[in-house]
Amino acid sequence: MGLAILTNRESTILKSLIINFVDHGVPIGSQFLSKIYHNRLSSATIRNIMVDLEGKGLVVQPYTSAGRIPTDLGYRYYVNDLMIVEKLTKLEKQQIDVDLQNVSEKDVEAILKKSCEALSKISNYLGVVLSPRFYLGVLEKIELVSLSDNKLMVIISITSGLVKTITLEMKTSIPVNKLEGTARILNERLSGLTLSQIRDTFEQRLADVSQGGEEELINQLSESVAKIFSEENENIHVKGTQNILSYPEFVNQDKISKLLELFDNQKILIGILNESTKEDEKISITIGQENKDELVCHCSLITAVYRIGDVTGTLGIIGPTRMKYEKVTGLVDYITQKITDLFS
């Protein structure tokens, strides 16, 4: 459905109505807006404009004799055409900078956790950060470390500098003297490929290995290839559950139940975030019913993609549709750029 074309007056009234509704949380009436404009526009004129906006599906009157509130379509028009992104204050930027600089830049998960906390604290909504999509990284090196007779640690380094470790239970005892040779063969055959490519072609690339212990060990590793080169995000950081549940929009028991189900099922949450985020857009904003999953059909998501070398991850904010879009967009943009800069 295409967005309506508005006159300057309609745009002005819609923008003012949305800003004030977000601030106050009650239907906005024509008399209220007339006072804002110091009676330059009469209450009757504004009421007529509101009727036109309602006819275009941008506002709705929740009950007789009430003012109007924005619809999802009204918010969409505001975000696309009327919103001016708000920059963070100097103090907010300093707070984020200090928090991130106090974490070792090699500790990716600690940086993402701090970023999630900042998203939640400054927005007062739900902050969410997904770990980088490790499986899209290019393999730099594999190391094999014996932990016991039948327990092996596989250390995977990708070219962006990220490292992942996986512990495997092996069927037979591990010939420790064969680990170095096996790792050398793996690196010769697999370095320079993405982890997803390795997962899909591991057996073919190692099929002709026939060097005693190395062959036996590689066969055992082949059985665990799905675990070693998994597509699953290792971690998802979520902060601010109480923030979002404190909004009056979520006093309805059905809405609360949907949110709690969302918080309890990280796989669904990861899917929703990935679905709502478009890598070709700097900031992705999904409003209310635009969300395909009913668990967030009463929420808005503002997300972005951060980069660590050749891999990407998603971060964002979930809140009610009555959201300070201009503020949250500026916040998501700043933290996305901050993470990217830290690892560039």
Image: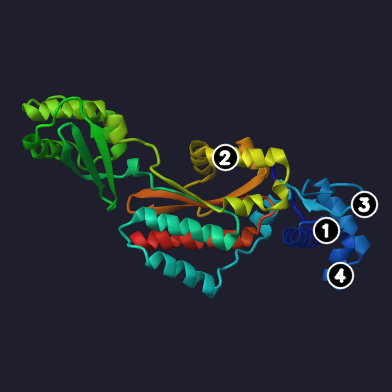
**Residue drawn at point x = 16 percent, y = 29 percent:** 218
Tell me the distance, in whole angstroms, between the alpha carbons under discs 1 and 2. Answer: 32 Å
Name the residue: 44% across, 59% down: 114
User: Does 139 sit left or right of 244 as displayed?
Assistant: left
Residue closer to the observer: 205 or 230: 230
Q: Mark 4 to mark 2: distance in Å?
A: 42 Å
* Mark identifier at residue 65: 3
Which quadrant of the rendered structure holds the N terminus? top right
* Viewer-side label of 4, 2: 2
Q: Kindly report the distance in space between the C-alpha atoms of the residues bearing marks 3 and 4.
A: 18 Å
Q: Which amino acid lies under the numbered mark 2 shown in the image of this protein?
A: Leu
The amino acid marked with disc number 3 is: Ser
Q: CA distance from mark 3 to mark 1?
A: 11 Å
Give me the residue at 86% from left, 73% from top: 38
**Mark whose residue sits in front, 3 or 4:** 3
Residue corresponding to mark 1:
28
Residue 262 tag number: 2
Please identify the quadrant where the C terminus is shown. bottom left
Instruction: Give the foreground label among 1 and 2.
Output: 2
Q: Is residue 23 left or right of residue 171?
A: right
Q: Mark 2 or mark 3: which comes first in sequence?
A: 3
